[in-house]
Image (cartoon, helix red, strand yellow):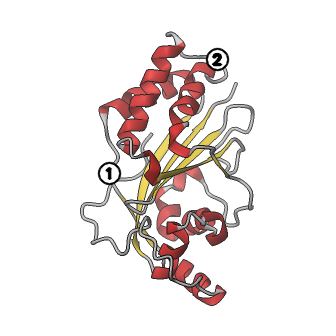
Amino acid sequence: MRVGAPAVRLPAMPRRWNEIDWDEDRPGQKKLVASQKTLAWERVPLSDPALDRYLEQVAATHVHGGYLISRWRAVEYSDTTAWFMSRNRLDEYDLLRVFFSSKVVRKGLAELQVPRKLKRGLFEEQWAGSLCLDGSLAGVIVDGGAYEAYKGPAREAKALAAAAVEALTQNRFADFRVDVSEVAWTPWFHDIAWDHTFVLTDFANAELTVLCITDTD
């Protein structure tokens, strides 16, 4: 299911996360911590027929679990945040912990039941990022859940996933980082064998898209 209603209007975006000034010095720890406290998020719309077709197959193959999907834009952040994002230093910045700790995000993702204290090492950057994402998403429905798997040929599953990735990224592959987790990092997951989390960071638009999938027998 899609989580939460989208915001109607979004403020103008501050400095983009894909704009790098190589002459800037690394911000100190005090600035880093201060920037984490001022980072603010708002939901953005996420709807596309190609994405819906793929998610229909996720629901059909994970019948006792399902999925959650939501997209968020950073609408307030400092140049310190942009410094780390533009250099793909998300782990150093601890972006995902900061993101999932936000009161607005936690409220919007209430069904996910995000723990108040997230452990480090839950997510791993996917090699080649969004270039490999269609294969990963295709694998989710081809392997299926506890009782069901995609009923068509694998090539159709790959095509469905590729169309979903195009909807999510507009094929701007260089603008995206993908972090993945296969563990039950919140109580929403059934913690058996079919837990998947994909977090897409769009550096061009300062957006994070979260897709969580689970199932149980």
Q: Is residue 114 above or below residue 95?
A: above
* Tag 2 near tag 1, CB within 8 Å: no
| Residue at the image position 51 percent from the left and 81 percent from the top | 80
Q: Position of residue 5 (x, y in %)?
A: 34, 53
- Which quarter of the rendering shows the N terminus? top left
| Residue at the image position 46 percent from the left and 71 percent from the top | 20
| Residue at the image position 44 percent from the left and 29 percent from the top | 162
Q: Is residue 37 above or below residue 50?
A: below
Front residue of this view, candidates 6 and 204: 204
Amino acid type for the residue under numbered disc 1: Pro
The residue positioned farthest toward the front in the image shown: 23
- Which quarter of the rendering shows the C terminus? top right
Front residue of this view, candidates 201 and 17: 17
Q: Which residue is mark 1?
A: 45
Q: Left or right of 9: which side holds 72?
A: right
The residue positioned farthest toward the left in the image shown: 9
Crowding near the residue tagged with mark 1, few <14, some 14–19, many ≥20 C-alpha atoms within 10 Å? few
Badge 1 marks a residue whose secondary structure is: loop
Measure how far apart labels 2 and 1 are at the Cα level: 32 Å
| Residue at the image position 50 percent from the left and 76 percent from the top | 22
Q: Position of residue 30 (x, y in %)?
A: 63, 89
Badge 2 marks a residue whose secondary structure is: loop
Q: Left or right of 138: which side holds 215?
A: right
Q: Which residue is mark 2?
A: 147
Amino acid type for the residue under numbered disc 2: Tyr
Which is in the foreground here, disc 2 or disc 1? 1
Crowding near the residue tagged with mark 2, few <14, some 14–19, many ≥20 C-alpha atoms within 10 Å? few
